[in-house]
Image (cartoon, rainbow, N blue to C red):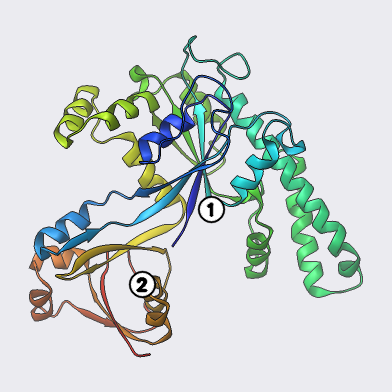
């Protein structure tokens, strides 16, 4: 399941430094704007202790975690919607992602140039919001022009499209993002997906702070939280420079000592990866056998056949049933055989909605 989160922000806010911490792919990080021109793509392992605990019990030949893709996208400036700077490239790249990690500079440092001359994360957020909204408004107005005549002539499908587009247009003209316009029904949900509007993508705000503010935050972070309180968006606090130091340490023990000295339980990048996974509305199920213990990514709400299809399309086409063990039951009884003996293995059909952490074995016929 190739799902991508795009890291966006103004130039010099710490996007590439953060990307380097997340991925083995090394983006150039330097103290000047537009350091990143082509989008860098990194495949990121999703940390999940459940996978390790299953492996301890099963002793497989290999362990395969699940992953998501993180894309480091070129910095944006005012006028991007009209092609200023790298605007058109930026907007095309962000359109290809499924969710947005919006990095905001929340630290003062005279040695790191700010593209607008001063640190103001709320202003920075609004600059990007406005550019994305303007581009979406251009898209929406173009679609309205195409469907307006048919809608007024009585075409029912065109009327549905027109009514939804008008609501989105009104929101965008008021400086609101398309994600604030809630679809009234399944038809409008389909229209919303088809439009692929930039401001309809789920967003996570990431406040990049100095070392002293990693645990408690700072005044800049509070400004961001206040600015986004009505957006139903999560705000994470990370020190990208500290994360780079942690990533440079060779052993797990060294990294844990560093985190303990800072008063942190886990690295910020781990929190970010899990938050990105949640942002994409994803969950994990497992397969566990002597060959491998593996985590698989599916959408929340997926059925058993859909989950099977992530392994192979034939599994979904020829789905017969799924044998399901709850993670807690597997840990408690310590083996598949013991779970079966205790009567804790479920046999589920096509309508079964997979739960996060389910351990599954599929029966199929092709």
Question: Quadrant where the C terminus lies?
Answer: bottom left
Residue placed at 54% from the left, 41% from the top?
Answer: 39
Residue placed at 55% from the left, 35% from the top?
Answer: 228
In the current view of this chain or complex, which residue is farthest to the top?
Answer: 110
Q: What secondary structure is marked by label 1?
A: loop
Q: What secondary structure is marked by label 2?
A: helix
Query: How would you rate the neighbour count of disc 1 (Cα within 10 Å): few for under 14, some for 14-19, many for 20 or more?
Result: many
Residue placed at 78% from the left, 61% from the top?
Answer: 163
Question: Quadrant where the N terminus lies?
Answer: bottom left
Q: How far apart are marks 2 and 1 (CA)?
A: 21 Å
Determine which of the numbered discs, if any, sits on residue 98 in the image.
1
Pointer 2 residue? 311
Q: Position of residue 70 (x, y in %)?
A: 45, 46
Q: Where is residue 73 in the image (x, y as percent from the top left)?
A: 55, 39
Query: How would you rate the neighbour count of disc 2 (Cα within 10 Å): few for under 14, some for 14-19, many for 20 or more?
Result: some
Residue 243, placed above or below residue 336 = above
Q: Where is residue 238 in the image (x, y as percent from the top left)?
A: 38, 30
Residue 239 visible in the picture: no
Q: In which quarter of the image is residue 307?
A: bottom left
Residue in front for this viewpoint, 86 or 356 = 86
Residue placed at 34% from the left, 90% from the top?
Answer: 365
């Amino acid at each position: 399941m190739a799902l991508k989160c795009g890291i966006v922000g103004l130039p010099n806010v710490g996007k590439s430094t953060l990307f380097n911490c997340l991925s083995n792919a090394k983006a150039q990080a330097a103290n000047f704007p537009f350091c990143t021109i082509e989008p860098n793509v990194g495949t990121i392992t999703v940390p999940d202790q459940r996978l390790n605990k299953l492996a301890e019990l099963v002793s497989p030949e290999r362990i395969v975690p699940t992953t998501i893709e993180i894309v480091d996208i070129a910095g944006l400036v005012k006028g991007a919607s009209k092609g200023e700077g790298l605007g058109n490239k930026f907007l095309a790249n962000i359109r290809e992602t499924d969710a947005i990690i919006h990095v905001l500079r929340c630290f003062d440092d005279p040695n790191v140039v700010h593209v607008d001359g001063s640190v103001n994360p709320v202003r920075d957020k609004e600059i990007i919001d406005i550019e994305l909204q303007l581009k979406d408004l251009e898209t929406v107005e173009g679609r309205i022009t195409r469907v307006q005549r048919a809608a007024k002539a009585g075409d029912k499908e065109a009327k549905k499209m027109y009514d939804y587009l008008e609501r989105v247009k009104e929101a965008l003209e008021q400086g609101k993002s398309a994600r604030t316009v809630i679809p009234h029904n399944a038809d409008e949900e389909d229209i919303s997906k088809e439009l692929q509007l930039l401001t309809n993508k789920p967003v996570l705000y990431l406040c990049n702070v100095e070392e002293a503010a990693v645990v408690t935050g700072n005044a800049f972070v509070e400004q961001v939280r206040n600015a986004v309180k009505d957006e139903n968006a999560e705000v994470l606090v990370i020190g990208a420079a500290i994360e780079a130091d942690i990533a440079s340490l060779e052993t797990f023990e060294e990294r844990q000592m560093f985190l303990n000295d800072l008063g942190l339980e886990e690295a910020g990048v781990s929190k970010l990866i899990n938050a990105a996974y949640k942002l994409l509305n994803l969950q994990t199920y497992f397969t566990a056998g002597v060959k491998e213990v593996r985590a698989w990514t599916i959408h929340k709400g997926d059925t058993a056949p859909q989950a099977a299809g992530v392994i192979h399309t034939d599994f979904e086409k020829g789905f017969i049933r799924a044998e399901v063990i709850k993670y807690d039951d597997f840990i408690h009884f310590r083996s598949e055989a013991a779970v079966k003996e205790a009567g804790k293995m479920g046999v589920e059909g096509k309508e079964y909605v997979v739960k996060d952490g389910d351990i599954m074995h599929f029966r199929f016929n092709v």
